[in-house]
Image (cartoon, rainbow, N blue to C red):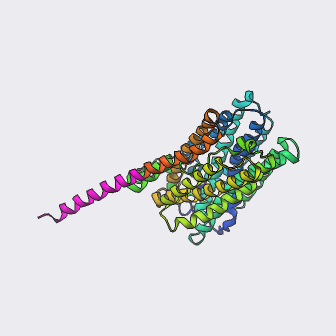
Amino acid sequence: MTARMEAAATELGAPAPGAATVHPWIFLPLMTPFGVSNGYATVTLAFLLGRAGVSTVQVTAIMAVWFWVQTWKVAWAPLIDTVGDPRRWYGLGALLVGLSIIAMSLVRPTPGAATLLTGLVALSSAAATLVAMSSDVFLTHFAPPTMRGRASGWAQAGNVGGSGAGGGLALLLVQHAGPPPVAALALAAICAACALVAWRLPALAIAREALHYLRRLHAVVVDVWTVARSRTGYLALVTMLLPIASGAAPWPAIAGEWRADADLVALSNGVIGGLCAAVGSLLGGRICDRLTPKSAYATFGLASGVVAVVMAFSPRTQTAFLVFTLAYSTMIGAGFAAYSATVLEAIGRRSAATNFNLMGAISNVPIAMMTTFDGWMHDRFGTRAMLFGELWVQVLAVLFIAGLSFATASRASFKRGIDLADTTSP
């Protein structure tokens, strides 16, 4: 991951001469616009659409677009790696996130505006990919080995915490500070401030060898294929495609069934929910050190489904809505940590940026699918059936990956036995 060619460039992608190591806290604001984009689309906009009478299936379809765009980000990831200064890409992404949110706030949330809002959500999501991938560049090059864990923790907090806090903050402002454009301007100002933080980072140098793009691309393709054909690699790829710990439940769209007002939604799915998700990420990371990452991933996914099922039988009160949505957010935050650990276990150090983006793109497919599925289940069978689906879909997914893991382990053991016989035969 590199920047523009410099005359005295050194090692590929190394910090420019004289660059200082940054403190790990800086990765929280760097990932915040990514979370803000997600939070506004899936919390604030979803609530406003639901309150305006737009059907749940239409709301969840608009929400799902944000995640579908994320599945294609690997297609333009090489631009961040090879063209220009990543700080400029970050600034462009943060600017477009802010402008897209302002544009969404100017559109009246009605069924007739669904197409326009879908396009703006897609633009915001695409802009957020520039923010995230540039932040990956900074994380790779400016976090020393002794601080990588802490830096990753701050970045994850900016992601899940920013998503909740960004959406919740906007909703609170909409309810108490004026019309939606007021909240949108505040979020755009946050994005602009984060862009200024990015420009305080040292410049990156690039070696001349980096100009042989096709040569590098071939090496990346070989590395990706090597990971994909290994048992650990293809099990991780399949796991990323399964709806485990997707966190797709459309709480803002069904909040009225628990008599939850805008303030409660802003807190439970916004500010406080974001903090719970961040805490869940930290706890999930610790648990991943004791369990295998895939086992932890499955555990947290099933736990989120259990929370949803228990909520289905809970009283339709504001207290129940707050308790269960916060518990759900905590489990999803832990799932995010287990997801990262699963990917890192699979890719090792082989073209880590491209492999990680590939896994990340794939992992957004089940999120988008579950978002649409939840909306369809709600409108067709009701809220209780939707919440039951949150568990049973994940049960089937976990059973599938457990069966595949057992089958491939048996074949691998059988093949090792044949290889051993061949080497010991006379």
The quarter of the image holding the N terminus is bottom right
Q: How far across and down, in percent of the image, does residue 11 sit?
A: 53, 63
Q: Is residue 76 magenta?
A: no
Q: How far across and down, in percent of the image, does residue 337 sit?
A: 58, 59
Apparent side of residue 275 relative to residue 412 in the rendered image (left or right): right
Stretch of the chain drawn in magenta: 402-426
- Kindly report the secondary structure that dominates the magenta region of the rendered protein: helix
Q: How far across and down, in percent of the image, does residue 90 sit?
A: 67, 51
Residue 103, above or below 343: above
Residue 413, above or below 314: below
Apparent side of residue 39 relative to residue 403 in the rendered image (left or right): right
Residue 367: name its quadrant: top right
Q: How far across and down, in percent of the image, does residue 356 sit?
A: 52, 53
Residue 375, above or below 425: above
Apparent side of residue 270 relative to residue 416 in the rendered image (left or right): right
Question: Is residue 128 shown to the viewer in this render?
Answer: yes
Question: In the depicted view, which residue is nearer to us: 18 or 68?
Answer: 68
Residue 13: name its quadrant: bottom right
Spot the residue most to the left.
426
Question: In the depicted view, which residue is nearer to us: 48 or 178?
Answer: 48
Q: Is residue 407 magenta?
A: yes
The quarter of the image holding the C terminus is bottom left
Spot the residue most to the top.
112
Question: Is residue 159 shown to the viewer in this render?
Answer: no
Apparent side of residue 11 relative to residue 56 in the rendered image (left or right): left
What residue appears at the point 57 percent right and 64 percent down from the top-left corner? 285
Question: In the depicted view, which residue is nearer to us: 157 or 151?
Answer: 157
What residue appears at the point 64 percent right and 45 percent down from the top-left corner? 249
Residue 66: name its quadrant: top right
